Image (tube, rainbow, N blue to C red):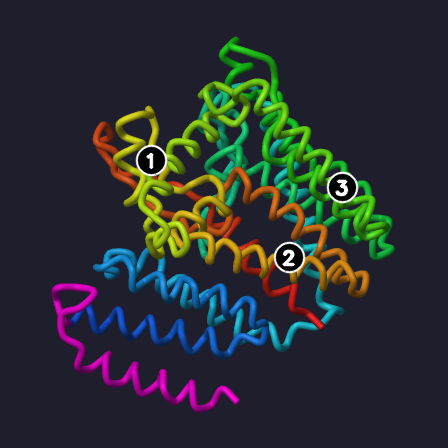
Amino acid sequence: MIEPYLLAVLLLMLVMGTLASAGWDVFELRNRENWWFVCILGIEALLMENKFAGLLLAVNILGLWQIGRSWYVLRQTIIPMAACAGIYALVTPHLKLWMIPYVLWACVGIGLYLAAWAALGWHIKRRPFRFMTPARFKWFGMWGWYEDLGGGLRHLCGQAHRIHLSSLAALAMAAAAGLVWMGQWWAAPAFVLCYLPMHVTWLTCDRYAAGDGPRQPHVGHLALIAVGIAGIALWHIQTAGLLLTGSTLGAVLWIWRTKAWQDPLWIDSGRLAYWRDVFTRCYWPFGWKHRLFGFGTCTWFARTCRMGDALYKQVFTAAHNEYLQQLVEHGLVGLGIMLLYLGEAFWRLSHGQPPQQAIALMGAAWCAIALVNFPATFYHEYHPAHEKKEVWFGSPPLNVWTLVLAMLAEAR
């Protein structure tokens, strides 16, 4: 019975949204706006049928009480979070298994579109180039294929960065693999073709293009390994567990042997070095209160930017690792709840019907992408001191795919 709790939050929203004085913000009207949207998030958490998802949202709600003035992230994070949580709570009870193949084919179609774009970019060597729709067809904006950058960023296919393009290509390949698993074997050629954007980014990786080293694997390859292990899990979960354990230990030993956390030019583009300094300088030294509960929602940048400015050429405005960001912002408790949500979803989907198992394959790709990218972090801006204008980071397409995956995981 959630009705009494809903009534309590409604009353809280009415009173605090009207009468709250200075609190989160020194200006009372901004503080009332904060209360309004925090109560909306609370109502959405109560309405979620998946209690693990509701608990994960509750962690973000409680984290807002830790950060003092939350109005500065209201429009950047809190309101988009409320919109996504509301859609999740509203839509998931109505999703059915028969809808999944249609969504997966849409994902594959997007992957094929990006593959065709990449093929054009590979064929045309000059930069920049643009092939746009005529101006008279502007009702839905300007559409077209273009590439504006050279060097190691020759192939972006409209996705702002190669890591986002490779992530989308890997998710499209996972969708094709899911269709094949469901018996739609004619998706197999699409599985191969959707690899093309990943391939062209591999051929023009930064260090190879600059003559500093060999071509290196990237996030797309990591995601495909995860899809392969998840596919084995659908057949025999014990074998997949042994393979996952062995490959993880092998990766740890390789990292330890190469001391990758000391090399900013390693294949991780300096992520391990940055993460090490965040953990040792910005997280662990602040005691068990913050180790358990973190520093609050949206605090990654505030906690780490000074360290990044002092030690690195480029500040990580997001962790490029959703798990580490969850640890810093919500502590061991928040990370544990996130892993519980993901683990329950994978276990339930992998033991479900073929359409649910297909979503498990895409979920495995997402979990791997989240190790080195930030698909669940909203698009945001940063004003570096040495830049004349703002710089934007993130991938709205990956945000969309993350939300759709989370909703499809609840289809019955």
Identified by mark 3, the residue type is: Gly
Query: Measured from the top left, where is residue 259 in percent x and y?
Result: 52, 20
Q: Can residue 101 be seen in this view?
A: no
- The image quadrant where one finds the C terminus is bottom right
Question: Would you say residue 174 sits in the magenta stretch?
Answer: no
- Residue 221 vertical placement versus 45 (above, below): above
Q: How crowded is mark 2: few (under 14 residues within 10 Å), some or many (20 or more)?
A: few
Residue appearing at x 71%, y 37% in the figure: 225
Query: Measured from the top left, where is residue 323 in percent x and y?
Result: 50, 47
* Earlier-in-chain disc, 1 versus 2: 1
Question: Would you say residue 12 sits in the magenta stretch?
Answer: yes
Residues rendered magenta in the picture: 1-28
- Give SS at disc 1: helix
Please name the residue that numbered disc 2 is placed on.
343
Residue appearing at x 59%, y 27% in the figure: 201
Residue appearing at x 33%, y 52% in the figure: 295
Instruction: Check residue 37 in the rendering and tell me which mark sits there, or answer none.
Output: none
- Give SS at disc 3: helix
* Earlier-in-chain disc, 3 versus 2: 3
Query: Measured from the top left, where is residue 240 in percent x and y?
Result: 78, 44
Magenta span main SS: helix
Residue appearing at x 65%, y 41% in the figure: 170
Instruction: Check residue 228 in the rendering and tell me which mark sits there, or answer none.
Output: 3
**Residue most toward the front?**
288
Q: Distance between the residues labelled 1 and 3?
A: 36 Å
Please name the residue that numbered disc 1 is placed on.
281
